[in-house]
Image (tube, rainbow, N blue to C red):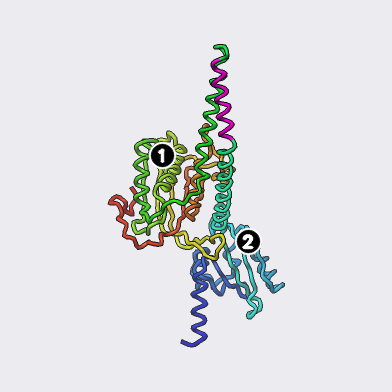
Amino acid sequence: MTEDNLGNSVAMAVLNAIQHPVVMVDADGHIVFANWEAEAFFGASASHLARYRISTFIPFGSPLLALIEQVRERRAPVNEYRVDLSSPRLGQEKLVDLYVAPVLSQPGSVVVVLQERSMADKIDRQLTHRTAARSVTGLASMLAHEIKNPLSGIRGAAQLLETTVPDEDRPLTRLICDETDRIVSLVDRMEVFSDERPVDRIALNIHSVLDHVKAIAKAGFARNIRITENYDPSLPSVYANRDQLVQVFLNLIKNAAEAIGDKPDGEIQLTTAYRPGIRLSVAGSREKISLPLEFCVHDNGPGVPADLLPHLFDPFITTKTNGSGLGLALVAKIIDGHGGIVECDSQANRTTFRVLMPVSKDSALDDAIPANSTGSTR
């Protein structure tokens, strides 16, 4: 192999390894190169794409065409964010960030890199969830120290008053005691957010965790709801605390069950899969963590209101009449503490809570997959 051929081979391998669509457009607008992600994005092979101009595959009047012309004229790269490329050919909800740069060695040619907003929004939401979890941690710590002590004094004073006031006024002192106890109970629930002690983690088989959670749900709050599984039996181990993962998925499945309510055909589906390609930077270092393990809880309830969806993991956000809005905030805190992501996608009759987590460093551990944790849907 000549040096030029070797260089071309390496360049092709690098471009195909990029997890974003990359195309090169010549001076006439023809697509002269497309990596594997671009083939998937446009739904056509590179050889098919090469027969046409890029204008054939994107909506008429798309800002992308204007960006390409701008880059050719300026001979300088341009970024454009949240560009809608939705069309019958490409599909709905094709919102992308664009990076267009000139190929200086070939006048008139440009390289276009597309980043689908679904992935970018996923990372943005995770940063929001982490901020929310930290806010709750600080608030919980403050409440524990600054509120519980005065509440104790208020309750004690109300109990003393109860012995001296007339009988007709005693319901008022009883009300003070009951409401004080309710506030203390809420503060106690929030104190879990301020617990920053390290937890013991081991390499776990996620299917054994999910099967345990399913058994709890079927014995109680989800006894009348069908729960199915679609597991990948070859999934590597996840490095986590078992009790905390049980708490996470109990919260998610309980939310799903409450959303379904008395719906006669209500169903919750648990799925696991291996999804390479998502990487997060670790604060304070150059390390990047891969999050290929995907664990999902799907339900066919009415869905989450669109205006609530961006704030779903914030504290005190809830659609329940008597809910505290702390369950999903706690889920976000626990998954964040494990270096993972939790997100929600929702539309009418289909809501998915998706947990993405890293593989255990000891992924070679021979975890015994439970006999009923097959790859089939039940």
Q: Quadrant of residue 311?
A: top right
Q: Quadrant of residue 149?
A: top right
Residue 20 sits inside the magenta stretch: no
* Element assignment for label 2: loop
Q: Residue 23 at what x, y percent from top left?
A: 56, 70
- Residue type marked 1: Gly
Tell which of 360 and 178 is nearer to you.
Answer: 178
Check disc 1 and report the residue beneath it: 266
Residue that appears at 42% across and 48% down: 245
Q: Residue 334 at what x, y percent from top left?
A: 48, 49
Tell which of 223 and 117 is nearer to you.
Answer: 223
* Element assignment for label 1: loop
Query: Can you tell which of label 2 and label 1 is closer to the viewer?
Result: 1
Magenta part, dominant SS = helix
Residue that appears at 57% across and 30% down: 151
Check disc 2 and report the residue beneath it: 60
Tell which of 153 and 288 is nearer to you.
Answer: 153
Count the marks: how many?
2
Q: Earlier in the sequence, mark 2 or mark 1?
A: 2
Tell which of 344 and 361 is nearer to you.
Answer: 361
Image height check: is 175 above or below 36? above
- Residue type marked 2: Phe
Instruction: Give the magenta-colored segment's residue range.
Output: 147-163
Image height check: is 159 above or below 263? above
Name the outermost residue toward the bottom.
2
Q: Residue 267 at what x, y percent from top left?
A: 40, 42
Residue that appears at 49% across and 56% down: 339
Q: Residues within 10 Å of mark 2 (few under 14, many from 20)?
A: few
Q: Residues within 10 Å of mark 1 (few under 14, many from 20)?
A: some
Judge from the rendering whether residue 235 lies leftward or rightward of residue 24; answer left or right: left
Q: CA distance from mark 2 to mark 1?
A: 42 Å
